[in-house]
Amino acid sequence: MLQRLYILNYALIESLDITFEQGFSVITGETGAGKSIMLGALNLLLGGRADAKSIKTGAQKCCVEATFDVSKLQLQDFFAEADIDFDGAECILRREVSSSGKSRAFVNDTPVQVATLRRLGASLIDIHSQHRNLLLGEEHFLLETLDTIGNCTELAANYRRDFSAWTSAKKELLQLREKADRAAADADYLQHKLAQLDAAALQPGEQEELEQESETLSHAEEIKGAFFAAKNALSGEECSPSLAIRNAIHALESISSVYAGTEALTERLNSMRIELDDIADEVERTADDLEFDPARLSYVEERLDSIYSLEKKLQADSIEELLQKGEEMREELERIVHIDSLIAEREKQVEQCKEALLHCGQALHTARQEAGKNICKTLCHTLASLGMPSACLDFSFAPHPQPEASGPDAVSLLFSGNKNVPPRDVAEIASGGEIARLMLALKALVAQHRQLPTIVFDEIDTGVSGTMAEQMAQVMQQMAARCQVLCITHLPQIAALGKHHYRVYKSEDDTTTTSHIDLLDSEARIREIANMLSGAKITQAAIDNAKSLLQMA
């Protein structure tokens, strides 16, 4: 239930803070006073398109905020999934739009995507404006109505699941058949690439070893010269460190008999000499082993060129990736070889999926037909009370050539408002007043089967007047026993039957025009209804008539 609506700097509304009550409330006001503006603000709050033009002139941003009582709704899973704080009793929605056109959305002060706001709003409030009467001619609305009232939502969900499985299986079959058409060319290509890979006889780690060997062979003379220089530095006859250490050892040994501290130093020098001699020998052996081998270098470079060429052709960065691609190509060749059997399996799967879909579709068709009969029977009874005793309704079900996502049938609503007139599509034959009453009757029926905490009717009384308006108001009164009903109306007969009455008006000064809304007390309500009856000049007769309407209500 909508408890409070706060609007700041939206269109002609500078600041509005209004509290709404449970039951049937009416909202009245002159044309252009701002009723549609308030409705636009609500639509913005529920995820409608944000537009900087909606900001009041001179302001930097607008804000719309609403507080809802959600204690009777089962919304715990939604809030848990969206990771939004929820106390189980109250929910606050807020939407802000800046002068740059950017908008922000919040639920319980948690920033959310507009899509989240839209999903939550659909569970909190249903706004029915005049253009929504056209939904009677739209199949998706009729199907949703049939499924809601006929308790077919689970069956419809199962049908959509089976339809998705069928379409997926058909898509996979089509892809397999297209692949089969290309199979011969693909097989030749894969076999050619695999032959190249197999001929290369690649080994893991081979590329790194060859690259290192190529570096060594390419710089063999340079490396050999460096080792010879190192050898001469370590063991040259004139100034080698080994000779210097030997001389130092001899010098220390010559005084060992007269100085006891030389033994440890001599041992350390001996260790250094042995290590240096060992290094010198290894350097010499390495220098002797290094030879420039042009033939080997040529082989290594050719081998690397082959590897690099394969990596470029197959878009790989290493031998390991080439080997992996080779395995993938072998698997693909295996699939190509067995593609006919795969196609046969997929054809069987498509048939199985279609059989399951048709079975579910038949059950859905039967359930929707039964729901249609019950809906038409109830609607005709309600329409009779709304001044249409001869109204005749029927749902038409025309089988689709192939199953579609919405169901097995094309559905339309047939209507006739007069005796002996065959029913035709409601969008083609019904007048504005007839459609308004039919839509109200349908909404009242939906409210009995679906939890609608708040429903807003925006001038649903278009095209009706007098007694019919009063009877429409009585239907809304009955709906208000199950949910909160707000009705924007121009008809005094409907305004008089509201439990609560709000008046929208505007004020002007030298620079701005501003819309306001007030909850009317008894006296103000009499004057407002009298004004609706007689116009700007309120007569005593209009006042008496207004009092009479309120007393009858």
Image (spheres, helix red, strand yellow):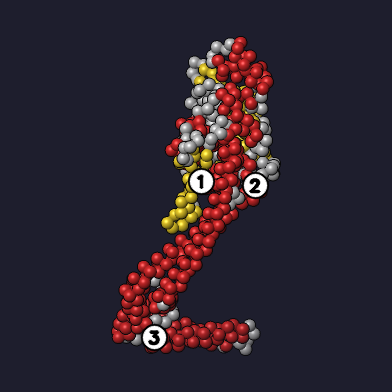
- Kindly state the secondary structure of the residue where label 3 is placed: helix
Amino acid under disc 1: Phe
Residue holding disc 3: 287
- Kindly state the secondary structure of the residue where label 1 is placed: strand
Write the residue at 67% across / 33% down.
22
Rendered view: 172 above or below 214 = above
Amino acid under disc 2: Leu
Question: N-terminal of the two: label 1 or label 2?
Answer: 2
For disc 1, the neighbor class at 10 Å (few under 14, some 14 to 19, many from 20) is: many
For disc 3, the neighbor class at 10 Å (few under 14, some 14 to 19, many from 20) is: many
* Front: mark 1 or 2: 1
Q: Which mark is residue 75?
A: 2
Residue 54 x/y as whole percent: 48, 31
Question: N-terminal of the two: label 3 or label 2?
Answer: 2
Work out which residue is located at the far front of the displayed protein and give it: 420
How far is disc 3 from disc 1 in space, using C-alphas?
Answer: 100 Å
For disc 2, the neighbor class at 10 Å (few under 14, some 14 to 19, many from 20) is: some
Rendered view: 531 above or below 129 = above
Name the residue nearer the viewer: 46 or 242.
46
Residue 455 x/y as whole percent: 60, 36
Q: Which mark is residue 471?
A: none
Name the residue nearer the viewer: 121 or 145.
145
Rendered view: 435 above or below 451 = above
Pointer 1 and pointer 2: residues touching (CB < 8 Å)?
A: no
Amino acid under disc 3: Ala
In the image, is 230 to the left or to the right of 365?
Answer: left
Residue 353 x/y as whole percent: 50, 65
Residue 257 shows in this picture? yes
How far is disc 3 from disc 2 in space, using C-alphas?
Answer: 83 Å
Write the residue at 48% across / 55% down.
408
